Image (tube, coloured by chain):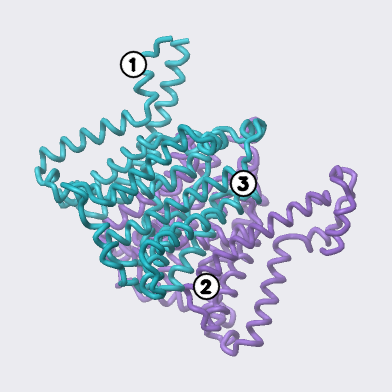
Chain colours: A purple, B cyan
Amino acid sequence: MTTAASDSATTPEPGAAEVPRPSVTLQVLLSNEFGLAALIAVAVVIFATSLPGFTSPFSLFTLSRQIGIDTMIGLAMMAVIVTGGLDLSVGAIGACAAMFFGFGLEQLGLPLPVAIVFALLLGAGLGAINGITVVRSGVHSFIITLASMSIFFGVMIYLTQAKGFNGLPPGVAAFGRMKLVGPVSVLLVTTLAVCAGLLVLYRFTALGRQMLSAGANARAAELSGIEVGRTLIFCHALTGALAALAGLMLTARTGAAVPSMAGHLGQDWLLPAFLAPVLGGTLLTGGRVSVIGTLLGATFVTVITSGLLLMRVSEFWVQAFLGLMLLAAVLIDKARHTLLRRRGMI
Amino acid sequence: MRQSLAIRLLDNDWAGPGLISLMAIAVISILQPAFLSPFNILVLLSAIAVNMVVALGQLVIIGVGQMNLALGALGGLVAICFVGAIEVLGVPAPLAIVLGLLIGIVAGMANGVIIARTGISAFIITLASLQIFKGINLGITKAQPFYGVPDSVKQFGNTAVFGSIPWLILPAVLGAFCLWYLFRHLRIGRYILALGGNRQAAELSGIDTTGTVIWAHALSGLFAAAAGMMLVARLQIGQPTIGDDWLISSFAAPVIGGASLSGGHVSVAGTFFGVVIIAIITQALVLFSIDPFVVQIVLGGLILWAVGINRFREWRLSKLAIQGA
């Protein structure tokens, strides 16, 4: 990278066409995903050698469980960042779905699979409400979802009177404790399956490609025959469903559905929701996603967080550190883009 | 060039919210006479004063076409630094106030510098700084409040100048007037609105966009700091949770007051009535012993309603303008 920097100083604003396209290997090496994977590897090696408890089966299990949940929260936000918009209500939707799940199991006596499906449908429905309001009103999703986060959370807390559901069937908590393949939590496996599904969606299906092109340039997408409004609503509904799934995973981890699981108004999810996709190279302006990047972003954050906690850094300072990390991530990304653009590589 | 009454009323940001405030006050005081008792008015005005300063902090940033998620976190950080400086370091209260305001300005400026220099969206930068401010706040306090608020500060937050007018109104009126004057008569105010209205045009006309964004964020930080310390005075305690619930209301009041979220168009008077409406509704829910959890639903609904009204007004205005031409 240092030689690249000095080269660029001698090249006065090259036209992108004159510079030969970089080789595939170089593109991989310069990608966000590779950078993140390298950082994760470095962090894991450092922590594993210096912190004795880091590689214990229990630590690996909680690590994998946390990666699973944080990635899911990140994926939920990623699905709407595609449109160039955002969804502040992911935490509220997650909490709503989890509480509805608890209500269905405890009060209505629904079988587990039915309750899961209903909760996911509720999440998708709430997301769709966001999407429809954004599309119909033409108002930016920030203000619409700011309002809806307050409404969703308010309705949920009013209906439940801020009381949780603690008497869930034992299967729920057992799922949260379940391990597959050594110490790997089944929650991470669930997330990996969803990642695979999303990869297929964005790479190989018409709907996924429509989402990407509608996000990259709505007018061009409209002209090429895509129903942009409907596509945006689908994106918001997908966000809602993924947020609901994250809420259910969190419920499985704690073994109870509690209204405060995502903090006041669900605000506690905002940082993990943006941190993972942004670290992973999802563009906030829309049109580009990285599912693997989001997974790696969440992994990196979780590894660093648990490493710091094992080093007995207070969790409050870890919180401040995560904010710094988000700041560093966007600044580095900006610098990388400037550098690559100057070199004519993108 | 005679403008029709309809256009003039529609063009006025504060007329609608002002009318609604008056009607709400009338209806509630008929249903519940205790609403207009001197004590209740004092409580209401104290809440309005603090929320007004919070809303002004967001209004500046809305004017420049951005958003500040870190407003509450900064207010909380300043609040605990203010009490912490007095209790732990023994700083006299007036000096601690200056220190608090300085922290607000500097932290706001830091936001502004990063946003303006990198061009990264204000949303993501202030989300990061929210986390940093909140983390520092909790790291210092370990989530425990500071209790060493001096009596003078406590009195300022809980006594009246005369009748039902609380001292807290003073900084709110001062802040509102200064911001109104700034938008109306000062160059920096016009720059902020020009930049929020049309970035390209502002750049082409030679406005220092970087400096303007930094100034706007510094002002926002100043208001956040003032509001945080006002809340300390009112609560009589340095709560680390101060500012946690500012996010929704800080946007709701300016939007109800007719501010355009794409920037360039704000109204201090409209924001005032936005704050009044929110305060009245919140209080009415308590007076009629309605579930306090409903407040969240109502606040969210108010934002949607105001956004809808603003869109409708834009549409009507453009139609009337065409007819009038």
Number of the front mark, 1 or 2: 1
Say which residue appears at 83% left-offset and 64% top-offset.
A2
Going by the numbered disc 2, the residue's amino acid type is Val
At label 1, counting other C-alpha atoms closer than 10 Å, the crowd grade (few under 14, some 14-19, many 20 or more) is few
The quadrant of the image that shows the N terminus of chain A is: bottom right
Estimate the spatial distance between the alpha carbons at disc 3 and disc 1, rounded to whole Å.
43 Å
Residue A105 is tagged as none
Q: Position of residue B5 (x, y in %)?
A: 34, 16
Going by the numbered disc 1, the residue's amino acid type is Leu
Estimate the spatial distance between the alpha carbons at disc 2 and disc 3, rounded to whole Å.
29 Å
**Marks 2 and 3 on same chain:** yes
At label 2, counting other C-alpha atoms closer than 10 Å, the crowd grade (few under 14, some 14-19, many 20 or more) is many
**Residue picked out by circle 2:** A318
Residue A335, placed above or below residue B119: below
Out of B214 and A159, give the one closest to the viewer.
B214
Image marks 2 and 3: residues in contact by CB distance under 8 Å: no
Considering every residue shown, the one lying at the far bottom of the view is: A52
**Residue picked out by circle 3:** A286
**Residue picked out by circle 1:** B5
Tally of numbered discs = 3
Number of the front mark, 3 or 1: 1
Image marks 3 and 1: residues in contact by CB distance under 8 Å: no
Q: Chain of mark 1?
A: B
Q: Position of residue A193 (x, y in %)?
A: 58, 64
Q: From the viewer's perspective, is A329 left or right of B286? A: right
Q: Chain of mark 3?
A: A
Estimate the spatial distance between the alpha carbons at disc 1 and disc 2, rounded to whole Å.
58 Å
At label 3, counting other C-alpha atoms closer than 10 Å, the crowd grade (few under 14, some 14-19, many 20 or more) is many
Residue A124, placed above or below residue A56: above
